[in-house]
Amino acid sequence: MSIAVEINRTLGDFTLDIRFESEAERIGILGASGCGKSLTLKSIAGIEKPDSGRISLDGKVFFDSAAKINVKPQKRNVGYMFQNYALFPTMTVADNIAAGLHAPGRRTGLRRRSTGTFAGAGEEAEPVKQRVAEMIKRFHLQGLEKHLPEQLSGGQQQRVALARIMACRPDLIMLDEPFSALDQHLKERLQHEMLEMLEDYHGQVIMVSHSRDEIYRFSEELIILDGGKAMATGQTKRLFNDPGNTAVARMTGCKNITPAIRVDAHHLRLPEWGADLRLEREIPEGISAIGYRAHSFEPVWGEKKGNCIPFHIAGADELPFERRYYLIPAGSGNEAERICWFVQDNDRRLMDRRPAPDFLRFREEAIMLLRER
């Protein structure tokens, strides 16, 4: 399965101008609110019409402005889960799941017969009730068949919405901030459940989110959107480990970004932190900053070893399972930008038995070499 997207759409002062191609089964789109994530999904689904561009899935053209092609949403065989799940409030769980199978123009892989059953090419007739029962069992909704959406928990509503989509055997599933309506304590469990429910679905899935953790856990390939444009695309883990520029580093959650001067192929100077770094790997020309994750520093007591920075602690926050330190580089004034150092629970207990470290050490493999854009 392969998707190719080229969308240009202007709404007031906002312009969405995005292009990407992917054969990955799980694609993530990460970006802040208002960057164009949902508009991208709605354009692929046919809910919104781009001003220009081309959208195709596995060779089937959904939209082509030059060729004047714009396939109706019902004929694209795309499943779309809205943020609020869009369940019919007066319909039971079973009827909500069946609704997708009855939708006019929907290509489900089944052909509607006058008997109220469906059949695909070379397939036996399959009653709607049988397909609904299959989805009820698959998504662990037994006993809830006659419940209305208002009688369900957020997680149950999510399973019903996904069951309704999967009942139609879509070629593509799109998830629009699927966990945004859930309480924080439910999100991690339901994210895991979602991945399990999608394990035996081998079509493509696109999920949009502003949560880095959700996107990292879910996606093989990642598109980072900012202001309607894709600032980076590629394998998710690679973009997090090596974002390439300062804007992408910030979007992937890097707390520590500071200007860097390339002295030579193996030597960087960090003027705002008062530190010099010597690297075994070669430093490309054009590097103007480094990024460093807050969890990656190593404390050093006593003699300075390797790439280290002296500091004093400006403040700290206690969280249930970590301590967050905010540091000022030694020799800098209080107006200096704070360095973030986050210490996990096990290391925090170890540090409580010792005085504050004299230095923090940079691990070379964790140093991100960055350009401006």
Image (cartoon, rainbow, N blue to C red):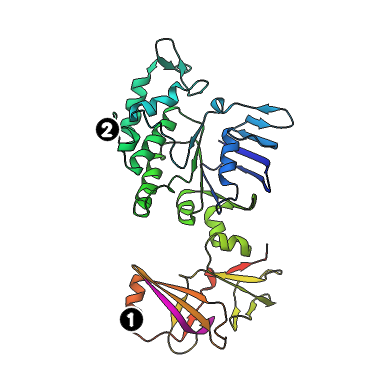
Question: Front-most of 317 and 266?
Answer: 317
Residue farthest along the right direction in this orientation? 66
Q: Which of marks 2 and 1 is nearer the N terminus?
A: 2
At horizontal 48% and vertical 46% (from top left) the residue drawn is: 177
At horizontal 62% and vertical 65% (from top left) the residue drawn is: 246
Answer whether residue 333 is magenta in the image.
no
Question: Front-most of 322 and 347?
Answer: 322
Find the magenta span and give its range: 305-318
x and y percentages locating residue 155 in the rendered image: 35, 43
x and y percentages locating residue 28 in the rendered image: 53, 48
Residue 352's disc number: 1
Residue 242's image quarter? Answer: bottom right
x and y percentages locating residue 300 in the rendered image: 44, 83
Residue 142's disc number: 2
Q: Which amino acid type is marked by label 2?
A: Gln
Q: Quadrant of the C terminus?
A: bottom right
Is residue 142 shown left or right of residue 361? Answer: left
Question: Could you tell me how far apart the alpha carbons at marks 2 and 1 are, in whole angstroms?
Answer: 50 Å
* Circle 2 Cα neighbour tier, 10 Å, few/some/many (<14 / 14–19 / ≥20): few
Is residue 365 shown left or right of residue 56? Answer: left
Q: Which amino acid type is marked by label 1?
A: Asp
Is residue 194 shown left or right of residue 51? Answer: left
